[in-house]
Image (cartoon, rainbow, N blue to C red):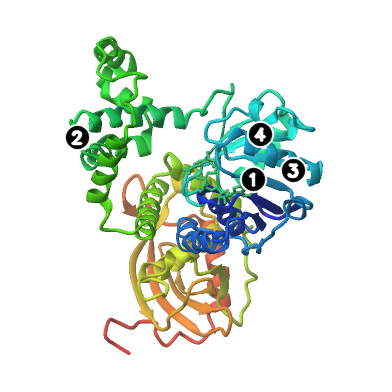
């Protein structure tokens, strides 16, 4: 495995169905070279389709450039595919005998150093490790569909896989944007599927007993507690349901109901042909208007929306995405050299997929964001940090006038410049340009005026002498630059 800002290497995906294809996409989009083994005649077409979906959805979650995509190849021979792998992800159907056979074949050809992870939903790692030559490098890495969007992966080392394997696995999984949840004690179906199964069992009873249709059950989840679960889970949600009395009050109030009980516990309705048909018919009535492919795209768009909103609040799965952005962050280049002959060249970026509008170009507010980030960089250069803001003041934006000159597409490199037009103890007036890096053409300009404000009093005040001096050094260097043509313009003036 080579070291870049994130770990990258060569991943071998054995079994390219719903889950294997999702793994292939996640590794690929994080710069790994991926080789897939799946004997199904339609495997390549199905995997490419999932990768296409992932290329649309996954980068829309990132606010940092994703690493350059790796390559994907398809291999008929398992031995040939695993031979130089750093990570092997077994994702064949959920049958223990098949998994044992595939794991034995993998072990026979794979390098000793690689991790062998299984996507199994139900088997314990000790069951998978039975009869293995090197059981300590086999563990469970159980993901959630769609693997390229959902961060959670349950990591179950079992009894044989040592701490070193577990730690190495967690590092790799975190480096591809996942949240590895280590399961401390192996158990059938790990954590999440046990929870989901209990809800599913109850839902089957509700349909069987004609209490509710599949659609009504889904509405009960998605219009209510499902929204709470997505951001706070079960216990944190119940803590709030206890009001000021918190969790202890909640348990005292609702705990006795567990003894009645409302649910059917482990009873399951018999899955007769009649019940299966009833559920399938209700599901057709509920969702048959959409194809599976349409529903997958709808699901992905919804998930991106939910995840981005959690990201803004740095909460739950959104906090994991922010952590991943920090991992992907390209180290900031230092302060630009102050020269008399030109504006300061400030930010070097590329247009992220999440910045694109329905026309396929960078959307309006992202131009303003780049100017705002450029200003932040200037303010840091002249000495504004958290202490300064708390004790002295901050620069408040009073006016901005922007012109949008040219379009720019996804992944195109861009850079911003800043020219100080005026600087004194209380005022800072600047002119920004956004350029395409390829040919330096101007994409947008903006002129802005900032006032220095004491945050406690809310009143304009002098910046510190040190800050004024630093700003003046740049302003002096810019004094003889030609005044930008668009400076001083007003709306409608061209
Ligand atoms: N579907 C889910 O939501 C989900 C979620 C998490 C984990 N899992 C687990 O992931 C694993 C795969 O599930 P899935 O839903 O992707 O199944 P799937 O049926 O969609 O895909 C399995 C793939 O394995 C291929 N395959 C069969 N034998 C093979 C072999 N010997 N070598 C290589 N490929 C082979 C099949 O052709 C198929 O494409 C299971 O262990 C399952 O429990 C599934």
The residue where tag 2 is placed is 212
- Please name the residue shown 50% across and 59% down the image: 50
- Please name the residue shown 19% across and 34% down the image: 212
Give the Cα distance between marks 3 and 1.
13 Å
From the viewer's perspective, tell me whether residue 111 is left or right of residue 176. right
- In percent of width and height, residue 75 lies at 69, 59
Residue 472 visible in the current orientation: yes
* SS type, badge 3: helix
Give the Cα distance between marks 2 and 3.
47 Å
* SS type, badge 4: strand
Q: Nearer the viewer, mark 3 or mark 1?
A: 3
- In percent of width and height, residue 308 lies at 40, 52
Camera-nearest residue between 412 and 278: 278
Q: Which mark is residue 89?
A: 1
- In percent of width and height, residue 15 lies at 60, 49
* Quadrant hosting residue 253: top left
Q: Name above or below for residue 96 compared with residue 384.
A: above
From the viewer's perspective, tell me whether residue 250 is left or right of residue 69. left
* Quadrant hosting residue 102: top right
Whichever of callouts 1 and 4 sits on the residue coming sooner in the sequence is: 1
Q: Residues within 10 Å of mark 1 (few under 14, many from 20)?
A: many
- In percent of width and height, residue 145 lies at 47, 46
Q: Which mark is residue 388?
A: none
Q: Nearer the viewer, mark 1 or mark 2?
A: 2
Q: Which mark is residue 105?
A: 3
Viewport quadrant of the C terminus = bottom left
The residue where tag 4 is placed is 139
Whichever of callouts 2 and 3 sits on the residue coming sooner in the sequence is: 3
Q: Name above or below for residue 184 compared with residue 217.
A: above
Does the CB distance between marks 1 and 4 fall below 8 Å? no
């Amino acid at each position: 495995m080579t070291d870049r800002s994130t770990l990258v290497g060569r991943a071998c995906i054995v079994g390219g169905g719903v889950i294997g294809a999702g793994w292939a996409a996640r590794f690929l989009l994080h710069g790994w070279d991926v080789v897939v083994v799946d004997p199904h005649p339609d495997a390549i077409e199905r995997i490419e389709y999932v990768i296409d979906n992932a290329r649309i959805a996954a980068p829309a979650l990132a606010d940092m450039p994703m690493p350059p995509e790796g390559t994907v190849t398809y291999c008929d021979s398992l031995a040939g595919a695993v031979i130089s792998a750093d990570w092997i992800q077994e994702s064949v159907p959920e049958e223990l005998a098949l998994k044992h056979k595939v794991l034995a074949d993998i072990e026979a050809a794979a390098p000793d150093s690689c991790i062998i992870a299984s996507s199994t939903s139900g088997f314990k790692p000790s069951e998978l490790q039975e009869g293995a030559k090197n059981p300590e490098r086999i563990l469970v890495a159980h993901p959630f569909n769609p693997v390229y969007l959902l961060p959670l992966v349950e990591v179950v080392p079992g009894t044989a896989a040592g701490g070193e394997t577990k730690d190495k696995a967690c590092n790799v999984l975190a480096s591809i944007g996942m949240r590895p949840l280590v399961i401390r004690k192996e158990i059938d179906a790990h954590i999440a599927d046990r929870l989901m199964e209990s809800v599913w069992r109850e839902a089957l009873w509700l349909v069987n007993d004609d209490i509710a249709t599949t659609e009504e059950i889904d509405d009960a989840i998605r219009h209510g507690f499902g929204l709470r679960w997505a951001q706070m889970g079960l216990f944190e949600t119940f803590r709030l349901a206890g009001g000021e009395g918190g969790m202890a009050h909640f348990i005292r109030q609702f705990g006795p109901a567990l003894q009645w009980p409302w649910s059917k516990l482990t009873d399951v309705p018999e899955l007769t042909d009649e019940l299966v048909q009833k559920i399938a018919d209700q599901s057709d009535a509920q969702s048959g208007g959409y194809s599976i492919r349409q529903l997958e795209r709808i699901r992905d768009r919804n998930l991106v929306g939910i995840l981005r909103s959690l990201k803004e609040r740095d909460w739950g799965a959104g906090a994991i995405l922010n952590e991943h952005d920090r991992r992907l962050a390209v180290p900031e280049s230092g302060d630009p050299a102050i020269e008399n002959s030109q504006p300061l060249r400030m930010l070097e970026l590329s247009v992220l997929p999440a910045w694109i509008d329905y026309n396929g170009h960078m959307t309006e507010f992202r131009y303003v964001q780049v100017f705002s980030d450029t200003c932040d960089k200037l303010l840091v250069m002249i000495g504004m940090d958290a202490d300064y803001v708390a004790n002295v003041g901050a620069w408040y934006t009073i006016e901005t006038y922007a012109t949008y000159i040219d379009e720019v597409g996804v992944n195109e490199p861009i850079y911003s410049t800043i020219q100080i037009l005026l600087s004194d103890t209380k005022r800072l007036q600047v002119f920004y340009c956004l350029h395409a890096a390829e040919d330096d053409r101007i994409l947008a300009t903006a002129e802005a005026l900032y006032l220095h404000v004491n945050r406690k009093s809310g009143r304009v005040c002098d910046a510190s002498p040190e800050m004024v001096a630093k700003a003046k050094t740049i302003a002096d260097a810019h004094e003889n630059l030609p005044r930008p043509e668009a400076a001083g313009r007003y709306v409608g003036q061209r």
